[in-house]
Amino acid sequence: MTYFEKLFWVSFPYIMLTMFVVGHIYRYNTDQFGWSAKSSEFLEKKQLKWGSILFHYGIIFVFFGHVAGILVPKAVYDLLGVTDHMYHMGAVWIGGLAGIATIIGVLLLMVRRFTVKRIFINSTFRDILVLILLTLIIVSGFVNTVWYTGRGVAFEYRETISPWFRGILALNPMPELMIGIPLGFKIHVVSAFLIFGLWPFTRLVHVWSLPLEYLNRKFVVYKAIYSRRILMMQSNRLKK
Amino acid sequence: MERKKSPLMKKLKFFGQSKDIAEHAVLSPMDREAEKVYRRRWQHDKTVRTTHGVNCTGSCSWKVHVKDGIVAWETQATDYPSTGPEMPEYEPRGCARGASFSWYIYSPLRVRYPYVRGALIKMWREELETIKDPVQAWQEIVTNPEKTNRYKQARGKGGFVRSNWKELNELICAALIYSIKTYGPDRIFGFSPIPAMSMVSYASGTRFLSLLGGSLLSFYDWYADLPPASPQVWGEQTDVPESSDWYNSSYLLIWGSNVPQTRTPDAHFMVEARYRGTKVVCVSPDYADFVKFADNWLPVKAGMDGALGMAMTHVILKEFYVDKETEYFTDYVKKFTDLPFLVKLKPHGDSYVSDTFLRASELNSTISNGDWKTVVWDQEKNQFAFPNGTIGHRWEDKGNWNLHLNDPEQDYKDIKPLLTILGNEETQLPVLFPHFEEETKEVLRRSVPVKSFKQDGETVYFTTVFDLMLSKLGVSRGLEGDFPKDYDDPRPYTPAWQEAITGVDRKLAAQIAREFAQNAVDSKGRSMIIMGSGINQWYHADATYRTVLNLVLLCGCEGVNGGGWAHYVGQEKVRPLEGFQTVAMARDWGGPPRLLTGTSFFYFATEQWKYDDTTMEDQVSPLVEKPRFLHGGDYNYLGARLGWTPTYPSFDMNPIDMTKGKDLSNKDQVIDSIVKDVKSGKTKFAVQNPEDPKNFPRVMFIWRANLIGSSAKGHEYFLKHLLGTHNGVLGEENTEVKTEEIEWGDDSAKGKLDLLVTLDFRMVSSGLYADIVLPAATWYEKYDISSTDMHPFIHPFNPAITAPWESKSDWDTFRLLAKTFSKMAEKYFKEPIQDIVATPMLHDSRGEISDPFGKVPDWLNGEHEPVPGKNFPLLHIVERDYTKVYDKYISVGPMVKEQIGAHGIGWSAKEEYEKLKKILGPATKTKDYKDCPSLYTGRDASEAILSLSSATNGSMAMKGWAVLEKKTGQKLSDLSEERAAEHFSFNDITAQPRQTLTTPIFSGSETGGRRYSPFTTNVERLVPWRTLTGRQHFYLDHEMMLEFGEEFPAYKPPLRKAAFRSDDNRPTGMGKEINLRYLTPHFKWSYHSMYYDNLLMLTLFRGGPTIWLNRDDADEAGIADNDWLQIYNRNGVVVARAVVSHRLPKGVSFMYHVQERHINVPGSPITKQRGGTFNSPNRIYMKPTHIIGGYAQLSYGFNYYGPCGSQRDERVIICKLDREEVNWLED
């Protein structure tokens, strides 16, 4: 095992995951006002409408696809009686459709960011970097799924990449699993970890601020200056 | 204090702990930390009282909030003294524009460092390197045409480099010294407008230049803000009520003044007056902001207001003077106007024309000053009477210059002047009156009742001004002649006649005139007319204004609170006038200063005179065979050589060389020899040859102003001829109408100016075209004072922060220049120089009784002998020690002890001078003037101005009143007694605004908290107006007034002009086009150039240059809203977007004032350059009657009388720019 193989399949993922966790805590604590999706809808609407919607719905499906393919061990499928054929049909068709939506979406966003002058002028280096990385990840992932499967030489990542990934999470790195996997998958994995590391320092943090609480929140929210004291008084009163 | 918790901990800790407290409400466990952001937004370290030195001259007091050393925002001050019970208050004052000012301080427009054009500084450094002598280095550059071209043609093309104060001061002073030595100090010019908006800054440059002997350019007339009708009628520059007095009016006629838009902080008084029941009538061609408040709207055709004024005068004369006599009116006009005065008639063919006022000297040659005493007919004694108060009495100093109707010559008391001869007439004579229409001129033949007397054996007929006026106006009293029958008769000047011209319904015009007069009857004169630039900025504005002023004069409204005229255009009221003049013109060190009419200067300096496209033939009275000259320029030369109007440079010689080799012990002889040389033609007036390099302006300073971008009417001519750089002039010189007396060179001069220096805190057009830009402090970074005629307070400027980057206050900048200059002068001017300063005969001096009977005593062709102060400029020999300029700049000179004053009264300020020395301390930094008060800082200057003015120092007011009491024999000092002990200090006015004292130098009383209204002292205390008759004038009998048919208020239509002359380079193939009148009224989102480029203001309306069009006009040329347009005529091209609106009438376009090229202006396909400024299609013309001088109220005063830079008479062609034609010239 070479130095670089260790670096890519052990150290690098841990560095990136550390940055991911610590970075988020740091950013959340120090930059409440910058914690934002940095929407550019104000500057351009028409292209954003298609690009953003396609991308976001696509990426949500893709995310769940990854959960199914990577976090869930192959044994679970076997146990449930999901055959490889069934799994791959699902992965290619559902994953492919979501992938197409995501790719079209991200490419539209990319074109928009570079061709609409006012958007480009208002973009930071980080905005552009994130977009390029995302495009790289999405395109490589899509190509991996469709290209290999489409050629009929389905690469069984569920036996290599997935256990490796779970090993990383379980603090039991198994870099040997990653040796010999096709280049496309390597690119996909490395760039994905890279974006995990950069994540806290970019607009991607908005993923954690999905306002789900609106679904069941009451209309009027009161905040007290001494909130804890008030809450205590409230509960004392309720006790009486 | 609770320890700060990390946001993440809070979020995690309280996750899901909300408590329901109602059906729809929840009590969140989250704290309210987030609110602190908003709370901190409005926390600040200190507030500082200051104001805005903007030329809206609203002079509002502001609190500037400073936080962490940064000016964060500003809010209106609210602590104005009360206007008293039953009155609305002044507070708060300020508008959205002012509230956005702090943006500028840190904006990209801010000039942070001293800049110089690269092409120039490169040569300068090279020359200095080799020559070592700065003056010679400058000479090397400016005497080498290749080198001068290099930097002059770079003007307006960028290429600024950062320099430093030391280097640029040396360069500027080298240029000054070289120009003084080679050409003379009067080749150095300073332009800065409206001192009232920041007096100390104004005074800094003018003080420095006056000590040098440089020429200061006027601005009020150049801006066409001066209403020349005011000097003509009242002998007063401009004197108007403060805005709170609008509330006292019970009938407001608002005529061409967009009060809510341009007088925003004052407009509420008009609205509040409406709540009190005041009727508001608006006259405006467009549905302007102020029309919203109108009970009646008179939509007059643009520029035709004079016709409406004449018709309304006709109605008032007919219904309130002839049909039934109104006692209040006749009493008033007999006492306070020239209507009862007698005018001689002169035979003209088989008829007569009106001539000069009858003078006492023509009836009794023994009467002193008899040429200057006008005459009435006493109806009781049935005799001529010579009432008090005329200009002849004024300069006799017998203590009877007052408005009591007494005749001291014949010892008559209580004269009863006859208003009309009718009923007492000897006969009726047909009199011819000039009449002007848009395309023609006519003569009206209407009879007048007359009396006669014998003069040199001949019968001379005379009548009253009133009789002439009635006949001129066409009010028939059964007299013979061309009188209209009734209001529906289309002959002049009936309501029907005006309807054809103005489009205003004849019944409505008559109704408004009737209501206006009836209100004045019922309220004893509380009918007011607020008038403004909408009618004031035309070529014939003075004629139009006088037709409108007829209404207030005939209805006895002047000198009454709530009544009279109210003109608000570029308000010019420096309340602490005497102190200001002293500091600004360096009068404390002698003088006189060189004060020049801006319009004449620019007319010649920018060679606009060679492009004139109208001749005087068009404008003279039809009763005159031909004008004296065809070309306006020749009139200016006439006025200059007669000493009527100033002219600098004065002669084609260096004024410091004119005494060389002459014996200075006999000054009269020296002056005589100079006059002789001029008469013989050995020495020539510089104005006779504006194209001779000896006569070029050489160095010019601009400060507190944006001359090139804002007021340069004939902008492209400025660029072409004054600055010598790229330009968009499309016209050709007019070789058909040439000057007769001014030399007409075939090759017009280009790039006359050697050095243009501007002091500014913004990089605007003036900076973009200057050679040197010095960073100025903003209004939040210096000490200064400001006043206005809109309100009676004086506001301080205080620095909220020190001037950031390398900027300096104007006072400090010029002090530094003075220091460098004096230091360098030690080498180049070892001895004091003798400077010949030529000045005109001044108003409010004895010079105003120079030319009796208002004749033209021209000496050029030998008919008269040139006599200084009579028909030739006064010549003064002024000694200047250039090594002492700095020391004099920073100390108050001792002349203050001898004489200080204004408006023709002077007194000694010895005590105040001593007190000032105690306040400011002695000038220890000087070498020789350690016994004088220090004037080192801008704050010292403010304090000096406050101490030396009667409006701010009670002891000065009392001294002034004492002098005026002696002159008039009237009791006056009681007006200031109640506040005689007050003396405003700078701290006082910083603590709270204070209302100024009643002063003898202004005509209104503020005693007992009364609201300021002009002429109340004249009416109530019988102090005469400073005019020929001492009364308000309807009739002006100067020969040149008669020549141009403006002896009476007259309707004169706009100039007949085309967009192009046949030999101009008119662009072809431009597609569909329309030809419209081009007006540039005041903007809603800026004041002149100020705020137009402010991001906050730009976001409010389309963010760039716009021009408003009527929708039908736009349709005709295929223009849709927001299309890019080219607007052009022979003067230049401007590019702007269309605002298509039904608000505008057809035939008119509005390009709001000062939309400059530095904000979003694309290129023009015609010129291939960036599309000009709003002034590119404009230019100026000379109005001959404005150069009259030496004759009572028609005498020169700085910013008081002079040709106006009118800009409303132009026509433009407008065509659409296709989208692909819009080129931003960015590659």
Image (tube, coloured by chain):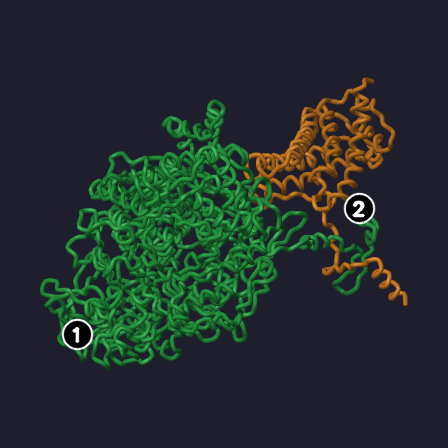
Q: Nearer the viewer, mark 1 or mark 2?
A: 1
Q: Which residue is mark 2?
A: B8
Crowding around mark 2 (Cα neighbors within 10 Å: few <14, some 14 to 19, many 20+) is some
Residue B238 shows in the view: yes
Q: Nearer the viewer, residue B626 or B669?
A: B669
Q: Amino acid at mark 1?
A: Pro
Q: In the drawing, does residue B917 fall left or right of residue A38? A: left
Question: x and y percent of residue A232 in the render?
Answer: 86, 61
Tell me: residue B1211, above or below residue B159: below
Which chain does the green colour mark? B
Please identify the residue farthest to the right as the structure is shown.
A240
Measuring from the top left, give residue A111's x and y in whole percent. Answer: 57, 34
The chain letter for the residue carrying disc 1 is: B
Relative to A87, is B798 on the left or the right?
A: left
Residue type at mark 2 is: Leu
Q: Examine the rendering and report whether any part of residue B719 can be seen.
A: no
Identified at 58% across, 57% down, the residue is B986
Against B427, residue B372 (above or below) is: above
Mark 1, Cα crowd under 10 Å, few <14 / some 14-19 / many 20+, is many
Q: Where does label 1 land, which residue?
A: B449
Q: Residue at x 55, y 52 (%)?
A: B933
Q: Is residue B444 found left or right of B14 in the rendered image?
A: left
Disc 2 element: helix
Q: Which shade of the palette goes to chain A?
A: orange
Residue B106 quadrant: top right
